[in-house]
């Protein structure tokens, strides 16, 4: 049975990886899928995705006591997923784990061959932050693109709110993705200074399901899901 595994990655911390993963989880309430928090430093997704319940949420630590990614642990976990009943798996990697993924792909076993052997189709979601996070975010995107050599689908996700004061950077990102033939998507236009934006961000921190939001925030969330997380 072929399975799709989506990695959400970015070596720059604080750009919205877990924010993205939260919306993805809300977008597939009835899907037979598993969400995996691979962020040992913050475990943000574990808190924000509590509405999924224990059956659809796992946490795994891939780092040793020196914050080095243990490749055997990662590869062994991937092999275990091949035996699971889940049709789709979403893995939210922390910044330290994301930083070391390129070396794993480049230096260890041929990663594409490994995934094909296990029956996995891999999609890499790379979240891009604006402002002061932009340069580091884009450098990671370029690094991953070079390492992957078009062997996997890559999607660059612009965290809209972090670009609101930097429209030129948003335009630049879209143009660069087009030139590199990378899928480009946007998400998360929630201004924390507005009433609805504040309610949404508070609900995310608390791990709300869609039905736990008030009417206005719930309608706004449904708009986000329809526009940015449907028909992937």
Image (spheres, rainbow, N blue to C red):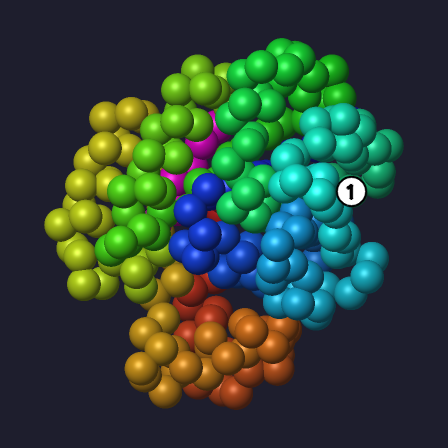
Q: Judge whether residue 150 can be spotted in this image.
A: no
Q: Horizontal and vertical percent for residue 1?
A: 78, 27
Image point 75% across, 21% down: which residue? 118
Residue farthest left in this picture: 168
Residue farthest front in this picture: 66
Q: Horizontal and vertical percent for residue 203?
A: 54, 78
Question: Does residue 56 sit above or below 53 in this rendering?
Answer: above
Image point 73% across, 22% down: which residue? 119
Which is nearer the eye, 129 or 73?
73
Q: Horizontal and vertical percent for residue 82?
A: 80, 30
Which is nearer the eye, 101 or 177?
101
Q: Judge whether residue 75 can be spotted in this image.
A: yes
Which is nearer the eye, 54 or 141?
141
Q: Is residue 49 left or right of residue 128?
A: right
Query: Which residue in the structure is indicated by mark 1?
Result: 86
Q: Is residue 131 left or right of residue 90?
A: left
In this figure, what is the number of numbered marks?
1
Question: Does residue 55 sit above or below 196 in this rendering?
Answer: above
Q: Horizontal and vertical percent for residue 83?
A: 86, 32
Image point 47% across, 71% down: which residue? 221
Image point 66% across, 51% down: which residue? 40
Q: Quadrant of residue 161?
A: bottom left
Label 1: element kind: loop
Q: Quadrant of residue 227?
A: bottom left
Q: Magenta stretch: residue 225 in it?
A: no
Q: Magenta stretch: residue 156 in it?
A: yes
What crowding class fits label 1: few (fewer than 14 Cα within 10 Å), some (14-19), or many (20 or more)? some
The span picked out in magenta is: 153-158
Question: Does residue 23 sit above or below 120 in this rendering?
Answer: below
Q: Main secondary structure of the magenta part?
A: strand
């Amino acid at each position: 049975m072929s399975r799709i595994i989506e990695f959400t990655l970015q070596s720059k911390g604080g750009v919205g990886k877990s924010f993205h993963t939260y919306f993805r989880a809300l977008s597939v309430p009835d899907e037979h899928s598993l969400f995996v928090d691979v962020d040992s430093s913050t475990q943000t997704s574990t808190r924000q995705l509590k509405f999924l319940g224990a059956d659809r949420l796992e946490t795994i630590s891939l780092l040793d006591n020196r914050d080095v990614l243990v490749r055997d642990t990662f590869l062994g976990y991937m092999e275990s997923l091949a035996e699971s009943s889940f049709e789709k798996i979403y893995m939210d990697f922390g910044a330290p784990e994301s930083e070391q993924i390129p070396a794993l792909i480049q230096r260890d076993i041929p990663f594409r061959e490994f995934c094909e052997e296990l029956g996995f189709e891999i999609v890499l979601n790379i979240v891009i932050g604006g402002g002061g996070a932009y340069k580091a975010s884009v450098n990671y995107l370029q690094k991953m693109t070079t390492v992957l050599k078009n062997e996997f689908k890559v999607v660059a996700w612009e965290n809209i709110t972090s670009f609101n004061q930097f429209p030129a950077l948003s335009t630049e990102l879209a143009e660069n993705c087009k030139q590199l033939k990378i899928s480009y998507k946007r998400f998360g236009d929630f201004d924390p200074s507005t009433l609805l934006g504040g309610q949404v961000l508070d609900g995310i921190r608390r791990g709300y399901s869609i039905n736990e939001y008030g009417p206005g925030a719930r309608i706004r969330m449904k708009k986000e899901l329809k526009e940015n997380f449907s028909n992937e």
